[in-house]
Image (cartoon, rainbow, N blue to C red):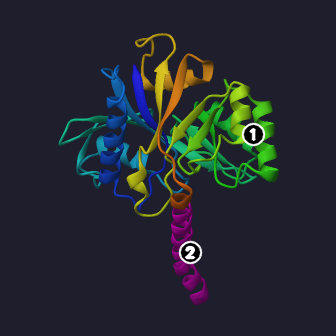
Amino acid sequence: MQVFADTHLHLYPCFDLDQAFTGLLDRLQLESSKDKNNASAIYAAFLAERADCNFYERLVKNYDQPKQSKPLLSQFTVVTANEQSLLLQEKSSERRLTLFPGRQIISKEKIEVLGLCTSASFPENLPAAELVEQVQAKGGVPVLPWSPGKWFFKRGQIIDDLLHRFTGQDLLIGDVSLRPMGWPLPLLMRKARRLGYTIISGSDPLPFAGEEQLFGRYGSKITSTEGATTAESIETLFRSLLNDRAVAKSFGQRSTPLQLTRRLRSNASARKGAMVPHQHQSKKG
C-alpha cells in the first residue's frame, strides 16, 4: 500500500471545498504518477481543524442525514462516513479521497499541537506536554508541527524539552509548506530526527480565501517497511509511523520566501478585517 497524503489540512468557511479537494486530488495523483510502483496508490488527507471549525462533523452529518443537512460539496459524493474516517468520490472522475478527522490545539505556551485521527475535542491553553498526553489518551496521533516564529527562543526550548520528555513512539513531527524553500531543516527538526522521530509533511493552509488552492502542494508518501500489503488500512499504516513499521517521504514544494511573505501579509490583513465588526459592536455596546 502506498498512501499519498497531505497530513496537515485546515478547513475554513472562506474555502471553496469542491475546488480544494479537486486540486488536492490533482496534486496527489500527479505525485503518484511519478512513482513507477503506483498501482496501489491511495489518496488521503489528515484534518487538523481549529476549535471553531467542524467541517468533518458536518460532512458526516451530510452522510447520516442527507435530507436534513445542507450539502457542503456539489462535485463530490460521500461514499462512507463515521467518526474514524470519511470517503469522498469525485463525481466527474470517480477518484477517491479518504479524510481523517483531527484537531489543531493551541497550548498555554502558544505552541501548536495537532491531534490527528481523532474526532475528540480538546481544551486549549493547557501545557503542551499535557496536550500531547490528552491526544494520546483519546486515541489520537499527536503531532508537533513547525510554525514560523514558534520554534525559536523560549518556545524553542519548550519544543526541545518535549523532544526529550517523549519519544518517536509517542508523537510525530510536522513539516509544513510555510517553511521557506532554501531553508535548511531547522535545528530542532534535525535533532528530532536524530532522536528517532518521524517527520510528516503537509500544506498547513492559512485562514483566508485562496489558500485552499495550496491543498496537496506539500505532503508525504507513506509506505510500509514490512511489505506493500501488511497495512490493514490507511489509518493503520499512518499509525505505524510511530513504531518504524512505516516510512514517510516528503513530496511537493514549500513556499518561496516571497510567497511566504505574501501569505503572512494576507493572513494578517484577513485577521485585521475580521476584527473590525467586533470593534464596531463593542463601541455600540
The picture quadrant where one finds residue 230 is top left
> Is residue 80 in view?
no
Question: How many numbered discs?
Answer: 2
Give the extent of the magenta segment. Answer: 261-285
The picture quadrant where one finds residue 199 is top right
Label 2 packing within 10 angstroms: few (<14), some (14-19), many (20+): few
Answer above or below: position of 202 versus 35.
below
Give residue 266's position: percent from left, percent from top.
Answer: 51, 68
The quadrant of the rendering that contains the C terminus is bottom right
> Is residue 232 in view?
yes
Asked if the residue at tag 1 contacts the one at tag 2, i.e. Cβ–Cβ closer than 8 Å, the answer is: no
Residue 129 image label: 1
Amino acid tagged 1:
Ala
Element under disc 2: helix
5 or 135: nearer the viewer: 5
142 or 70: nearer the viewer: 142
Residue at 67% of width from left, 28% of height from top? 197
Judged by depth in the image, the label closer to the viewer, 2 or 1, is 2
Residue 183 image label: none
Answer above or below: position of 84 versus 15.
above
Amino acid tagged 2:
Lys
Element under disc 1: helix
| Left or right: residue 225 compared with residue 186 | left
Secondary structure of the magenta portion, mostly? helix
Give residue 34's position: percent from left, percent from top.
Answer: 35, 30
Residue at 53% of width from left, 54% of height from top? 256
Residue 272 image label: 2
The quadrant of the rendering that contains the N terminus is top left
| Left or right: residue 178 compared with residue 5 | right
